[in-house]
Amino acid sequence: MITTDDEVRALAATVTDPEIPVLSIADLGILRDGRIEPDGTVRLTITPTYSGCPAMDTIRADLATVFAMAGHDKVQVDLVLSPAWTTDWMSEEGKAKLEEYGIAPPTGKAHGGPIKLGLTVKCPQCHSLNTREMSRFGSTSCKALYVCQDCHETFDYFKVL
């Protein structure tokens, strides 16, 4: 039985994103808080990468399942939209996992700096910078579709948000 907030957050961090199964919700930075209340209720806070993200229902169900298997049947998952999720919340380990999985990770910071007018995206296959955006939207809304002009592979790029 889990008794500390650290244990709650550690167990919640084992849940993966259903769209990118190599990433945990902690890697993505959507797991914002986890604690256990005096009555034993596990309370979790998650922020979607996009409002209306279809993965949130699955993530909520997966969190309930993980905690039920650990002996907690009272689980409250709060969906928080403000502040809005940003790729700045992704872990460096998560970005490395994305690239290893074949998705170019976001580069640069989303907030607090100058706005880039151009964007070079490194190919996750051959690491060339000779790439071109094919579509602003890839397999999901948070990704864009790129093609490498050296190895000719297409790949998703996780956009900076």
Image (tube, grey):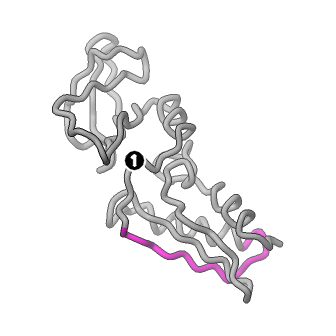
Residue 73 lies in the magenta-colored region: yes
Residue 1 sits in which quadrant? bottom right
The answer to which quarter of the image holds residue 131 is top left
| Residue 48 percent location from the top left of the image | 41, 62
Secondary element under disc 1, as helix, strand or loop, is helix
- Asked if residue 29 lies left or right of residue 35, the reply is left
**Above or below — where is 90 with respect to 83?**
above
Q: Is residue 74 in sight in this rendering?
A: yes
Residue 146 horizontal/vertical position (percent): 27, 29
What residue type is disc 1 on? Thr
Q: Is residue 81 left or right of residue 19?
A: left
Q: Residue at x 56, y 70 (%)?
A: 61
Disc 1 designates what residue? Answer: 87
Q: Residue at x 50, y 53 (%)?
A: 29
Toward the bottom, the furthest residue is 39
Residue located 38% across and 63% down the image: 54
What is the span of residues highlighted in magenta in the rendered image?
Answer: 68-82
Q: Give the image quarter of residue 145.
A: top left
Q: Is residue 161 visible?
A: no
